[in-house]
Amino acid sequence: MLNDFLTRREEQNEAVLRNADKVIKRIYSIDSLAYNEGALTVKTKELLGLTASLVLRCDDCIAWHLHQCYKVNVTTEEISEALGIGMVVSGTITVPHVRKAMTLWESFEKDETFEK
Amino acid sequence: MLNDFLTRREEQNEAVLRNADKVIKRIYSIDSLAYNEGALTVKTKELLGLTASLVLRCDDCIAWHLHQCYKVNVTTEEISEALGIGMVVSGTITVPHVRKAMTLWESFEKDETFEK
Amino acid sequence: MLNDFLTRREEQNEAVLRNADKVIKRIYSIDSLAYNEGALTVKTKELLGLTASLVLRCDDCIAWHLHQCYKVNVTTEEISEALGIGMVVSGTITVPHVRKAMTLWESFEKDETFEK
Amino acid sequence: MLNDFLTRREEQNEAVLRNADKVIKRIYSIDSLAYNEGALTVKTKELLGLTASLVLRCDDCIAWHLHQCYKVNVTTEEISEALGIGMVVSGTITVPHVRKAMTLWESFEKDETFEK
Amino acid sequence: MLNDFLTRREEQNEAVLRNADKVIKRIYSIDSLAYNEGALTVKTKELLGLTASLVLRCDDCIAWHLHQCYKVNVTTEEISEALGIGMVVSGTITVPHVRKAMTLWESFEKDETFEK
Amino acid sequence: MLNDFLTRREEQNEAVLRNADKVIKRIYSIDSLAYNEGALTVKTKELLGLTASLVLRCDDCIAWHLHQCYKVNVTTEEISEALGIGMVVSGTITVPHVRKAMTLWESFEKDETFEK
């Protein structure tokens, strides 16, 4: 299910950039910059992005950061603790998003077709 | 449409619990505890859960609490007033969720297959 | 501390109504209507307002509904369960608001000057 | 894709109004009133509704206001700047909604079947 | 009360910029860019910023945009309609913020010391 | 300013626990558990708590996690990157909170009286 998400995401990003003013373009550019290696590792930054996405309850954002976490070899135990902190902070209203997140995470292991 | 939701919910909960740390497991356990009979009745607690879910705009949470309300014989008038308070507090941004909620609620009366 | 809040609230409401268009005036009018006795009791409606205010994390709104709850003889046990459901739904981000809420609630018992 | 949305929206609104108490009905009525011509033009008001819907991240609300904006001849440059302000205010958590918004906006130009 | 806010704001912004990484600096820079004259006027953009700030319930952001609106000669009627749309969209949870906003707006007329 | 916050926090927590039902007590207990060393370090978990608190815009929560970060020797560069990610995700609506956060963080270095 990740590949469908990534394809749709890319197509829609093209629609955004065809119509974006310079403000929108700069936000896209900062978004890439923020997750680069720095004083914090890429792994820590992606976990920050994941937990922030969970407490704000954005499924697409969670899916994106889960994929990035998978690419940099975050473990299931680490994902679980990061989602756990998000659930403590933001409560059971996050549960439907955690359900989708864990289901997607398990699919990464089983589906050999998506990009790592 | 409720049964599809409940089936998917259960499958995804299993994915959560296969991967959950103890923090996530405890949140699941508190979630059950909170809606038990106490100084407030189950009915009042489910209405609190429903209105909280509406103002936070979580369709899955609304569907869950609507079903629980139906099981304990909350009336349509009571549902309408509880949703009405949520709409007053949280504004027209809740309207798409109220639309789905009322449509689901009506389906309970017509669909004899779902569990009460 | 409630009386200061109520006085400031009234003064500021006058500023709103001096400048309000008819949309704002109608929202004020619906706000009163929503908490009237109906299929649900005033007490249940005030608890719905309280829990909604907690999960949306609005201290002034919480203070208002706590006062209304006090006027209609809601007990401390009932307040605690309603706040507890809000905390489960919306997580520890609500804790600073629960701290203020419980402190205010205790002050009602000790302060004989505020209006019941 | 707009027509499907508008049809479903209308059917579900009927479910709401079949079950609504007077509070819900009044909110529906204020919702129409708020976007009428006044000191601000309909165009400015619809842009306010659009940006408010983006920062609160409600896809249905965004779709609705985009359609209204299209009807009153808002340009793509104006939509882009209004969405850009929403993105600056509310951050990259809005990006999935901007993706859908821009894709829908482009579809208006290509699809001759929807109501203007 | 505006001048106190502006002074504190400036002092605290200096603390941010002393410690900011390049991501934070770029966000500050986009924030200025977004409200410049473009396809939309400065006035419309400030009203968008005001309404977005109201529905997200940020008093400091509301105060800032109210001041900017005052500088570009937005009228009280226009402020009232923009706040009215925010209240309809986001409900009575915004009322405490509207109370402060209208009180601040009235103070602009009476206080000759703040910068226009 | 931290010490005032910590004192008030402790007094108010006592008011909560005097009146709490078991649901509230369990949430307090999970809150401690979630930030213990595990697959993720205490430092990473506190940064997750900090960024989650920023995107949800809770000043008290930010102050708490800043203090915890200071105790486990998080550097200013790391704080800045974690806040930067929160600002990218959640936008300029977080700026007033970042202003307070950076001002508080600087005060830790200057004030020798607070507990590390």
Image (cartoon, coloured by chain):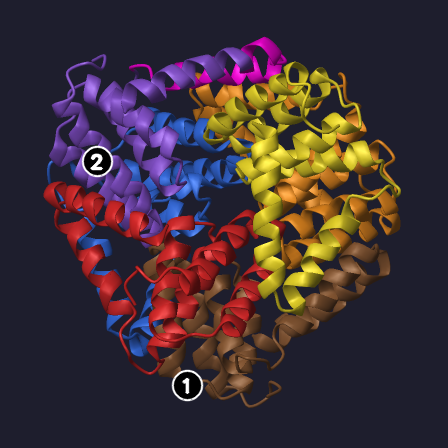
Chain colours: A yellow, B purple, C blue, D red, E brown, F orange
Q: Secondary structure at mark 1?
A: loop
- The C terminus of chain D lies in which quarter of the figure? bottom left
Q: Which chain is home to disc 2?
A: B
**Both marks 1 and 2 on one chain:** no
Q: Position of residue C18 (x, y in %)?
A: 30, 78
Going by the numbered disc 2, the residue's amino acid type is: Thr
Q: Residues within 10 Å of mark 1 (few under 14, many from 20)?
A: few
Mark 2 crowdedness (10 Å alpha carbons): few <14, some 14-19, many ≥20: some
Element under disc 2: helix
Residue at image point 67% right, 35% down: A65
Rendered position, A55 above or below F40: below
Q: Give the side of residue E39 with respect to residue B86, left or right.
A: right
- How many numbered badges does the structure rendering display? 2
Q: Is residue B22 above or below residue F47?
A: above
Q: Which residue is mark 1?
A: E75
Residue B23 is one of the magenta-drawn residues: yes
Q: Which residues are magenta?
A: B16-37
Q: Residue C68: in sight, yes or no?
A: no
Q: Which residue is mark 2?
A: B103
Asked whether F1 or D101 is in front, the reply is: D101
Residue kind at label 1, given as amino acid type: Thr
* Residue D29: x %, y % from top left: 19, 61
Compare residues B101 and F63 and report the one nearer the observer: B101
